[in-house]
Amino acid sequence: MRPQVSYSSARSLAPPQPTQRPPAPATPRPAANRLLASLHADLQQRLNDLGSRVALQKSAVLIEAGAQHTHVYFPCSGLLSLQTMTQDGNSVEVAMVGREGVTPPLAAIAGSPAAYTTSVTVAGEALRLRADALQAACDRHPALQRAVWTHWQAVLSDIALGSACHCFHTARQRLARWLLTASDRIQSSHLELTHEQLAEVLGLQRTGVSVANVTLQEAGAISSRHGRIRIIDRARLQTVSCECYHKK
Ligand SMILES: [Zn+2]
């Protein structure tokens, strides 16, 4: 087995470098979020300075439904899920937010209780910003306000589309749509997701997810093993998906 080299022992082997500066602290890279990247560089930097970069740990709950909404998250990588839940613990995803956007800004700015539970589906990083700081920045920079509202108009359209999708389309179609959309958001064909997570976002029983998963594998669209799903034939997956994927 390859021995582990501790940081201290590795450092002791290196000759002293008197002119070498200590490494700069890691700085947030807001441009990794596409909404922020659409803004002027000075404004990106301003928001970067106002916020802090946080790790998005898989399955972590960032905002509980009903809790006071004090911060917003601009994902730089990974994927967030906005879910609504019933009293008996069932859940369904109403929207996903990735690098293209930001978590619900309106409730945060208004100081209202969160309407959705926001949790991490795919681990990554985000720029976390206080809601009042976002409000002040929107007041001063109309371009930011336009970008945030335009994104959320698109999310609300997705929510409306999702309502019809849940009622009229099959589990297999919806799973195909969800995998394609998630893959687009994280720009990867590999997704680490358990059937339990898929059941939560799709509002299905685990057995329903398992059956749909098997049919997609048999169609040659995906491979799935030990919580790792890979899209192996995107075109085929699109033919299985319901029309909702193509309407986005
Ligand atoms: Zn659909």
Image (tube, rainbow, N blue to C red):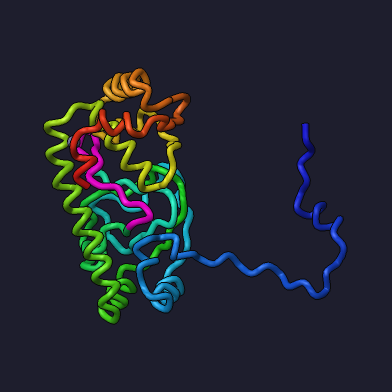
Q: Residue at x 38, y 75 (%)?
A: 40
- For this view, does 62 lie left or right of residue 205? right
Q: Residue at x 14, y 41 (%)?
A: 163
| Front position in the image: 161 or 6 | 161
Q: Quadrant of residue 74?
A: bottom left
Q: Quadrant of residue 132?
A: bottom left
Q: Is residue 195 above or below residue 128?
A: above
Q: Position of residue 115 (x, y in %)?
A: 21, 52
Which residues are drawn in magenta? Answer: 85-100
| Front position in the image: 149 or 113 | 149
Q: Position of residue 89 (x, y in %)?
A: 25, 34
> Is 94 in the magenta?
yes
Q: Position of residue 97 (x, y in %)?
A: 32, 51
Name the quarter showing ligand 1.
Answer: top left
Q: Is residue 160 above or below residue 206?
A: below
> Is 172 in the magenta?
no
Question: Which part of the image, by quadrant, shows the N terminus?
Answer: top right
Q: Residue at x 30, y 19 (%)?
A: 211
Q: Residue furthest bottom?
A: 140
